[in-house]
Image: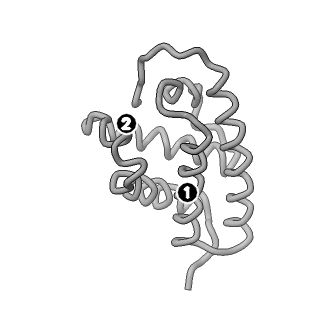
């Protein structure tokens, strides 16, 4: 039986599972596998801090989350694929009210992220960290 998402305990599991699936995903794998492998521990730590900040409203992430993604593919279908994958991982691992709340929060965040990134000028320099 699955339990509800307990962000302080489950953030690393959520992030690690997500990136494990991303690397093997037909749609996302090519994009994420281009990142230098030695940079993944730094990136994962940033993602733990980011999701801790988002889900617990406890600021551990102080960077601009949009800038590293500006020059990556960012059409609406990319965000839709990301959201589908993220929801599937939440469904795979958890169930309950906090999980439902997280899905709603991630839906809003994804929409805002897409619109904000589309407003940034492109500079053809992608930063994975």
Q: Is residue 115 above or below residue 4?
A: above
Who's the residue at 57% across and 80% down the image?
2
| Rendered image quadrant of residue 4 | bottom right
Disc 1 target residue: 86
Q: Name the secondary structure under disc 1.
A: helix
Observer-nearest of 69 and 30: 30
Observer-nearest of 121 and 109: 121
| Rendered-image quadrant of the N terminus | bottom right
Residue 71 position within the rendered picture, expressed as x and y whole percent measured from the top left: 48, 24
Left or right: 70 as drawn, with respect to 96: left
Disc 2 target residue: 42
**Which numbered tag is attached to residue 19?**
none
How many numbered marks appear? Answer: 2
The mark nearer the N terminus, 1 or 2, is 2
Residue 47 position within the rendered picture, expressed as x and y whole percent measured from the top left: 49, 43
Residue 62 position within the rendered picture, expressed as x and y whole percent measured from the top left: 59, 29
| Rendered image quadrant of residue 42 | top left
Left or right: 91 as drawn, with respect to 115: left
Who's the residue at 56% across and 41% down the image?
50
Left or right: 88 as drawn, with respect to 43: right
Q: Is residue 42 above or below residue 97?
A: above
| Rendered-image quadrant of the C terminus | top left
Residue 69 position within the rendered picture, expressed as x and y whole percent measured from the top left: 51, 30
Distance between the Cα atoms at labels 1 and 2? Answer: 21 Å
| Rendered image quadrant of residue 86 | bottom right
Query: Quick one: label 1, few (<14), some, or many (20+) residues within 10 Å?
Result: many
Q: Name the secondary structure under disc 2.
A: helix
């Amino acid at each position: 039986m699955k339990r509800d998402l307990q962000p302080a305990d489950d953030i690393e599991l959520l992030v690690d599972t997500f990136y494990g699936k991303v690397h093997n995903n037909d749609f996302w794998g090519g994009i994420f596998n281009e990142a230098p492998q030695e940079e993944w521990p730094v990136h994962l730590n940033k993602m733990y801090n980011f999701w801790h900040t988002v889900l617990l409203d406890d600021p551990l992430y102080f960077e601009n989350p949009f800038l590293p993604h500006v020059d990556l593919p960012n059409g609406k279908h990319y965000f839709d694929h990301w959201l589908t994958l993220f929801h599937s991982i939440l469904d795979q691992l958890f169930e309950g009210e906090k999980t439902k709340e997280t899905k709603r929060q991630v839906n809003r965040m994804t929409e805002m992220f897409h619109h904000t990134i589309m407003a940034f000028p492109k500079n053809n320099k992608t930063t994975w960290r």
